[in-house]
Image: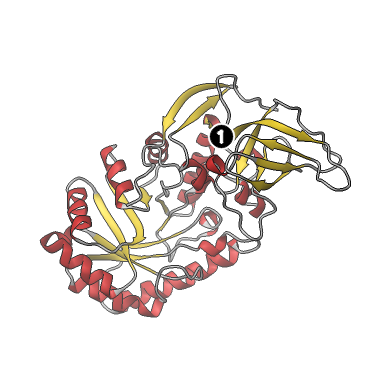
Amino acid sequence: MTTVPHEIDTPEIMVDREILARNIARMAEGVAAKGLALRPHAKTHKIPEIAELQLAAGAVGLTVATIGEAELFADRGVTDLFVAYPLWVGPRQAERLRRLAGRARIAVGTDSAEAARAMGTALGEAAGTIEVLVEIDSGHHRSGVAPTQAVEVARAAADAGLRVAGVFTFPGHSYAPGMPTEAAAQEQRALGEAARLLADAGLEITRVSGGSTPSALLTEAGTTTEVRPGVYVFGDAQQLELGRCALEDIALTVAATVVSRHEGDSVVPRRIVLDAGSKVLGGDRPAWATGFGRLMDFPGARITGLSEHHATVVFPEDAPLPALGERVRVIPNHVCVAVNLVDEVAVVSGGRVVDRWRVAARGMNR
């Protein structure tokens, strides 16, 4: 069992340096073997040091969720950035995009003719410096248009002076039991149809972008040109439950201390309480998940309740309860949320803290 380093005050996020490096290398090698480009989503980690590791491993650039994240990573020397979001661009956003385009290759998303025209108008003469990808709904039913509507949106973008580079999607429904393979197949069909329709309409398509952590290594070349997984660098309890990673792939945990302990009886459950609540773990729990998170060294335990500063962990009858004061490692359900709640993470190796990395893009929400 790996202990929590003595330098850690709980609750605190820890990143295992060796597991992180292994996860980065595995995804880079797996995607390259399929003939695809890797453009990892940096909203998961928001940490420049991790972005540098991803780029050194062969990533062609980064995906981000906001203009602010793009600005932060451009400041750190990243020269190829995709804001994979259907932006509504007004004068202030346009000025920021113009500045970004002066120092990096910038692409953004759109999913309506209205948004494309507004973007072109706001950017003015700089419209041609920005690449646009039309977002396609491949089954997640969040943002994005049906493949048959892609031409309308792309034509509006082109008429507004923007450079239409291709299409993208997020197969978010891959985050459900039994769905990664089917979601990957639906993604390929939707992107393939949209790309074909754009090509038939005379638009030159160079980028067909997809992929989530559950589906990235299920994606085949031929239709898609790049994938954008994010969570793979750390892993989390959702990926464990989906079978898309194993315990030995979990690079990020939250160090926590047992502050309350109850053997339970016929009325109340057998449980402990940790000092890591929703303010460090996040509160995400999909309907299919068996808890709000897991304990790294107690696989049968489940976090059944979260308060701001409490995590209630129920144990099976055949598993010993940790002692009061014992320090444990918690695997958050959704690692992207957890990282966004802290200012820095402790980097650990060989049972000790070897560095601390600032979550530099935290708060870059616009």
Image quadrant assignment for residue 258? top right
Q: Picture coordinates of residue 15 (x, y %)?
A: 53, 33
Q: Picture coordinates of residue 134 (x, y %)?
A: 33, 68
Image quadrant assignment for residue 203? bottom left
The residue most toward the left is: 125
Q: Kindly state the secondary structure of the residue where label 1 is placed.
A: helix
Q: Quadrant of the N terminus?
A: top right
**Disc 1: CA contacts within 10 A as few (<14), some (14-19) or many (>=20):** some
> Is residue 91 rendered to the left or right of residue 287?
left
In the foreground, 112 or 58: 112
Q: What residue do we see at 79% from left, 34% from top?
A: 321
Q: How many marks?
A: 1
The residue most toward the right is: 266
Residue 189, compared with residue 29, is above or below; it is below
Q: What residue do we see at 35% from left, 78% from top?
A: 197
Amino acid type assigned to the residue bearing label 1 in the image: Ile
> Is residue 129 rendered to the left or right of residue 299?
left
Residue 201, compared with residue 10, is above or below; it is below
Residue that badge 1 annotates: 19
Q: Is residue 71 visible?
A: yes
Residue 83, compared with residue 116, is above or below; it is above
Q: What residue do we see at 17% from left, 63% from top?
A: 122
What's the image's color scheme?
secondary structure
In the foreground, 79 or 58: 79
Q: What residue do we see at 49% from left, 45% from top?
A: 29
Q: Picture coordinates of residue 201 (x, y %)?
A: 28, 79
Q: Is residue 203 visible?
A: no
> Is residue 257 rendered to the left or right of residue 166?
right
